[in-house]
Image (spheres, grey):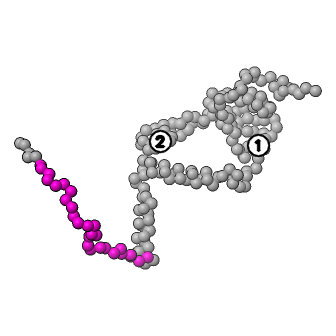
Amino acid sequence: MSTRVASQVGPKLGRKQIFLPNFTLTLLRTPTQPATFASFIVPLNLNKLDLRDYLWNAYGISVRGVRSYIQQQKVRQDKPGAKRPKPRKWYRPRAIKKMMVEMEKPFVWPAVPESFEDWDKSTFDAAAEGRKEEESVYRWDARMQANKERGSIAEQAKALQSGEDSWKQTPVRDEWEDVGEAVEVEQDVQVPPVQR
């Protein structure tokens, strides 16, 4: 007995064949929506028929309806990723297109894992924290914020004032360290006279 392909059994949809798609669809976790609805972030040039056709031919999901809207981004100072943002140079990031799909069968998200040790999340978080500290040095307002050494000095001063810590004086040497006999480096140097 032969098996029928989903495109032969289901409704007539687009016949545009895509073997290696050059776009990315991001499925969003939306716990407030019913299980028959799914939300996606899609490229700006993707339309409702393309999304419906893609879901049917790739996953065999029949779609009842598709809603789409374009969300404008907030205006920001300078382009993202700039080491030192330029003040008063405004930039609006590219808009985001979102689509909400109503499916015939419900889709239930898998449970959130309790432990992220399999994915080495602690190393990822440590690297992100280190990257954040490195980038804070290059921010445009970095000079206005107190650095770590200044905070340490302030803590030491508070401890001295409250009496928790006592002043430790380092011994000062009154005499120079003897390194040997003094030797004149340049001998018999003749300086040419200045001409006027």
Is residue 176 positioned above or below 66 on the image? below
Name which quarter of the figure residue 45 lies in: top right
Q: Report the front residue among 106 and 160.
A: 160
Rendered location of residue 70, percent (x, y) = 61, 33
Helix, strand or loop: magenta stretch: loop
Q: Report the front residue among 160 and 77.
A: 160
Q: Which mark is residue 194?
A: none
Determine whether, in the image, residue 188 is placed left or right of residue 8.
Answer: left
The answer for how far apart the CA atoms under marks 2 and 1 are is 40 Å
Are there few (<14), some (14-19), or many (20+) residues within 10 Å of tag 1?
few
In percent of the image, x 53 and y 53: which residue is there? 130
In percent of the image, x 53 and y 50: which residue is there? 131
Which residue is identified by label 2? 82
Seen as rendered, the residue at the extreme left is 196
Using the rendered image of the protein, determine whether residue 10 is visible from the camera's viewpoint. Answer: no
* Nearer-N-terminus badge (2/1): 1
Rendered location of residue 97, percent (x, y) = 63, 34
Q: Report the front residue among 31 and 131.
A: 131
Seen as rendered, the residue at the extreme right is 1
Which residue type does callout 2 highlight? Ala
Frontmost of labels 2 and 1 is 2
Q: Are marks 2 and 1 in contact (CB under 8 Å)?
A: no
- Quick one: SS at disc 2? loop
Q: Which mark is residue 34?
A: 1
- Queried whether the magenta region covers residue 176, the answer comes back as yes
In percent of the image, x 53 and y 40: which residue is there? 74
Using the rendered image of the protein, determine whether residue 7 is visible from the camera's viewpoint. Answer: yes
Name which quarter of the figure residue 27 lies in: top right
Is residue 176 positioned above or below 35 on the image? below
**The magenta segment:** 165-191
Give the position of the C terminus as an image quadrant: top left
Determine whether, in the image, residue 157 is placed left or right of residue 15.
Answer: left
